[in-house]
């Protein structure tokens, strides 16, 4: 009845961002080494552990990616057949390539496409929960508002995170003239779309905050048990190291309080706007 595609952009630069948060040039060799490590430890390991394996993972790399990195990329494919690396000529080719690659594989009357950044990770039931929402809708975006955030440097902090129109949105649609979840280049643009279902209290995603994040900062809140991290299936060695370095909640309790209030206000106002002013949505 449907096919599910997870779509990830890897080393395709989006202007005008040229440097990561720490000043490191994006897409140079050191960036690529570090990002492949993050990808393997957090993102790849979480997709490989999904309880529902009925999906195809399309990961887009730049055509100029050096051979030594391609060897590592192909090793991911050998380890996990759902992972499909695709090499394209820059960001301008991204959206057309997504549609082409899906069209070449599409055999069902419906499809689901899900966004996933290459340095984030998913709960092992993410795919299952997304597919549970399928009911032959012509067009419906699925937005799991609540998740977690994990800061891994310079200090480790694990916290709740709630984000309306976040980077983990999925789109259910008919295969005829499909557009995919990437039809909105920025995930925040889904705020303008009427056919969107906001789902609360299913924490099926985790944003990972690190020194090379170009735009993301730590916006978490709450004192939570470290054990919630288990079903995200971070590489075991890395998870143990993070647990040892985890910052006591008391060290950032005031920050948590401020961010909790700010988050509640933003989430409530955005959801209320959708409910009260649907005529403003497309």
Image: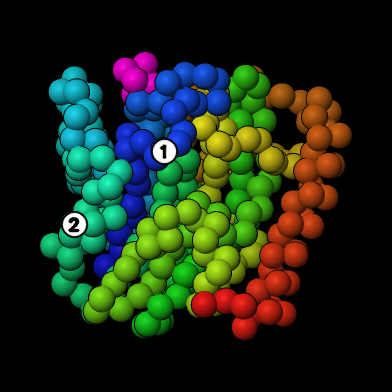
Q: Is residue 83 visible?
A: no
User: What secondary structure predominates along the stretch shown in magenta?
Assistant: helix
Magenta segment: 28-34
Asked whether, in this view, residue 164 is left or right of residue 174, the answer is: right
Q: Is residue 153 above or below residue 199?
A: above
Q: Is residue 32 magenta?
A: yes
Residue 73 versus residue 280: which sits nearer the camera? 280
Q: Is residue 272 above or below residue 158?
A: below
Dot 2 alpha-carbon crowd within 10 angstroms: few under 14, some 14 to 19, many 20 or more: few
3D distance between C-alphas at marks 2 and 1: 24 Å
Q: Which residue is mark 1?
A: 15
Tell me the SS state at disc 1.
loop
Asked whether, in this view, residue 179 is left or right of residue 213, the answer is: left
Percent coordinates x, y for residue 73 in the rendering: 23, 32
Q: Which residue is mark 2?
A: 101
Q: Nearer the viewer, mark 2 or mark 1?
A: 1
Which residue: 42% across, 55% down? 185
């Amino acid at each position: 009845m449907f096919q599910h595609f997870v779509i990830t952009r890897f080393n395709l630069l989006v202007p005008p961002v040229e440097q990561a948060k720490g000043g490191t040039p994006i897409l140079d060799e050191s960036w690529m080494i570090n990002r492949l490590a993050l990808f393997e430890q957090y993102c790849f390991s979480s997709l490989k552990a999904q309880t529902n394996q009925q999906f195809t993972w399309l990961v887009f790399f730049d055509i100029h990616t050096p051979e030594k990195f391609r060897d590592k990329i192909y090793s991911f494919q050998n380890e996990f057949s759902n992972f499909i690396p695709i090499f394209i000529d820059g960001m301008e080719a991204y959206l057309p390539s997504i549609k082409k690659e899906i069209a070449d594989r599409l055999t069902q009357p419906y499809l689901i496409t899900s966004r996933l950044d290459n340095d984030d990770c998913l709960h092992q039931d993410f795919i299952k929960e997304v597919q549970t929402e399928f009911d032959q809708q012509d067009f419906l975006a699925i937005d799991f508002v609540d998740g977690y955030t994990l800061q891994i440097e310079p200090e480790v902090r694990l916290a709740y995170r709630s984000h309306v129109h976040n980077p983990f949105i999925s789109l259910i649609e008919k295969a005829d003239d499909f557009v995919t979840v990437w039809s909105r280049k920025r995930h925040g643009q889904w705020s303008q779309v009427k056919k969107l279902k906001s789902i609360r209290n299913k924490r099926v995603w985790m944003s990972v905050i690190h020194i090379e994040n170009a735009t993301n900062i730590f916006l978490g809140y709450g004192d939570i048990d470290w054990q919630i991290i288990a079903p995200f299936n971070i590489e075991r060695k890395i998870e143990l190291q993070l647990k040892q370095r985890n910052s006591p909640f008391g060290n950032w309790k005031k920050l948590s309080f401020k961010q909790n209030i700010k988050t509640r206000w933003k989430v409530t106002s955005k959801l209320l706007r959708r409910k009260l002013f649907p005529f403003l949505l497309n």
